[in-house]
Every structure is written in structure tokens, then in C-alpha cells.
Image (cartoon, rainbow, N blue to C red):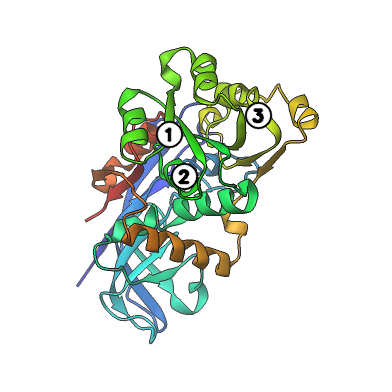
Amino acid sequence: MERRNIQVLLANRPQGWVQESDFLFTETVLPSLMEGEVLIKHLYLSLDPYMRGTMNDAKSYARKVELGQVMRGGTIGVVEATKHPDFQENDLVSGYFGWQQYSIFNGQDVLGRNVRKISPKDGIAPSVYLGALGMPGVTAWIGLQTIGQPKAGETVVVSAASGAVGSVAGQLAKIQGCRVVGIAGGKTKCDYVINELGFDSCVDYKAGHLAEDLARATPEGVDIYFENVGGEILETVSQRLNPFARIPLCGLISQYNEISPQGFHNFGALLTLRAKIQGFNVQDANTNLWQEAINELEQLLLTRKLKYRESIVDGIEQAPKAFIGMLKGKNFGKQLVKLT
């Protein structure tokens, strides 16, 4: 049976904010499988902030997408046909197969951390392996545990606290006995962070008095700042740092679409306070650390000690609009595209 594959390609390199015209849809006929190959029908596509950097013709922690190439992104799908002994029809597979409905890959080449067979536990939806049990959850775990190194009683601040990474990082810190303060945009997100995720407090950066609200929420200063946003929020939190504070630098989403990104002006505080700021890329972690993170996160989910939220749009044609909306903070939790 002939299968047609819809793909989303990078049509233009954005100057400033991404536009829907920067993407191009194309439809192709999938070739027949060769020996050793596997055909995956994707169920969900993950949309993540790092993708913005891959659209630029510049050095980034994620490899850039060339013009005319399929946009890079994580997916989870089902094996629809196979000529590889390690894969059976209906196996669930996650990997970085990009913005498209189908993928054909050589199972010999890619099995490992970046392409995994998934066996969801009872009660866990496959989509969660792109969020709390996927790259975002592992990012939160590795950044907090290896760089933040939280201790009970410390104050942890998390920006983008209702998002896929921030929500997990804050809950993990709370489980380890920390006082956790989120930063999010709007009352609805802040209420969710406190009432559903269990943070001690949440500062609404859209309210217009970030410094004053943060000072009230962190009367004893900040020991760990899990950074996802950058810009004004990074500058403001840096004024509250305690001696020997740690900043896992995960992302700078507020600056990704800026032609002239805002720098960090309070750099001298790092010296004065003997504080540490460390950028990290979860892909640098070894496979064993990934598996340790997933095992712990999965157990926390099964025991209902870890919560998550998803924003899902239907159809690959909605991917560009949803991606732009995510960069503007319109999503609530993990942003996904349902492909079937």
C-alpha cells in the first residue's frame, strides 16, 4: 500500500520572531523498506524551545537545520512495518525523527539513548515519554541534581515554572525538602504551580512588579535558580542570590527571537557571592544517567508524586503556529502535536 508522508521543512532563516512563512509543507511517497529498516508512524511530535536555535545559521548547542531540511524534533510513534529483527509491528519508538508523519530508519544505526523502544507502564500515556519522561524531564533531573545539588531547607527558584522542564525541576526540589518558588506568566499558571504542583509560592512576572514580589517570596534569598528564561528575570533573580548559590542554565527562551539579545549585567555578583552558573545540554549526559533519571521520574509518576500537564494541537499543519505560540508562552505545560 502506498504511504504518503507530510513533512515540514525549514524554508527561511528567521530574522527576529519566527513566522509561519518560515516553514514549508511538502508531501512525498515513502519508498519500500530495505532489509534492516523500520517504518514508524508518528503519533506525537514534541515542540521545544531549543528548536529556535536550530533555525539560525549560527553556532548553537543544537545542530542547525539546513534550508530545505525537515525541522528537527522528538517524536513517539508505532512501528507500522519492519525488516529488522529487533523491531516488531506495534512497538512504540521514541526518537528525534523531526516534523513529519512517518520515518524510515536503519535499526542498526540508531538504537541507543536517542532512539528507544518504549514500554509504557499502566496508566502512563505514550505522549508522556516526550515530556515528563522524555527529554524535558531528564533535562530537569540532570540540571537540578548535577549542577543545583539541592539540600533540604534551601530556597530554589524556577523560571518558566509551569512549563515542561520547570514544572519537573520544581517538583523534584520540593520532594527533596526545599522551599520552591516558581516564576510564571499570569494568575492561572501561578495558581497551577502552587495548587497542583505544590510549589510554596509563585511570582507572576506579568504583574509588573517582579522585584518586589520575588523579594517577598524569597525572604532568605535564593540558593538555587533553575534558569529557563534569561533577560529581565535572570537579572532580577541574580539580585537575590545567596553566597555559593548555583544556577543551572537550561535555557534563555525570552531571548531566542531577539535580534539583539539582552546580556547579563550583574556578572560581578557571581564573584562576590562565589556563586556558580553553568550552562548544560542534556545530550551531553551518558546513557546510564539518562536511564537513572527516567527510572526515578517514572516511579514518581506511578506513585503520583510527580504531576504534569500537556498542551496538544491536532494535525501536523498546526505545528508552526503551535511552535510560535510556545515561544510566546501561550502553551500550558508540554507542547505536543498529535499527528494521527
Viewed as shown, does residue 283 lie left or right of 296?
right
Residue 83: x, y in percent?
Answer: 35, 83
Residue underneath mark 2 = 174
Q: Position of residue 168 (x, y in %)?
A: 44, 47
For the residue pair 329 and 77, the one nearer the viewer reads as 329
Type of amino acid under label 1:
Asp
Q: Which residue is mark 3?
A: 241
Residue in the foreground of this view, choosing between 126 and 222: 222
Question: Along the polypeptide, which appears first: circle 1 or circle 2?
Answer: 2
- Quarter of the image where one finds residue 202: top left
Separation of residues labelled 1 and 2 (CA atoms): 9 Å
Question: In terms of secondary structure, where does tag 1 sit?
Answer: loop
Judge whether 327 appears above or below 239 on screen.
below
Q: Is residue 69 visible?
A: no
The residue tagged with tag 3: helix, strand or loop?
strand
Report x, y in % for residue 132: 39, 53
- Label 3: how many residues lie within 10 Å, few (<14), some (14-19) or many (20+)? many
Contact (Cβ within 8 Å) of mark 1 with mark 3? no
The residue positioned 38% from the left and 58% from the top of the image is 300
**C-alpha distance separating marks 1 and 3:** 18 Å
Q: Quadrant of the C terminus?
A: bottom left
Q: Earlier in the sequence, mark 2 or mark 3?
A: 2
User: In the rendered structure, are the residues bearing label 1 and label 2 in contact, judged by CB atoms less than 8 Å apart?
Assistant: yes
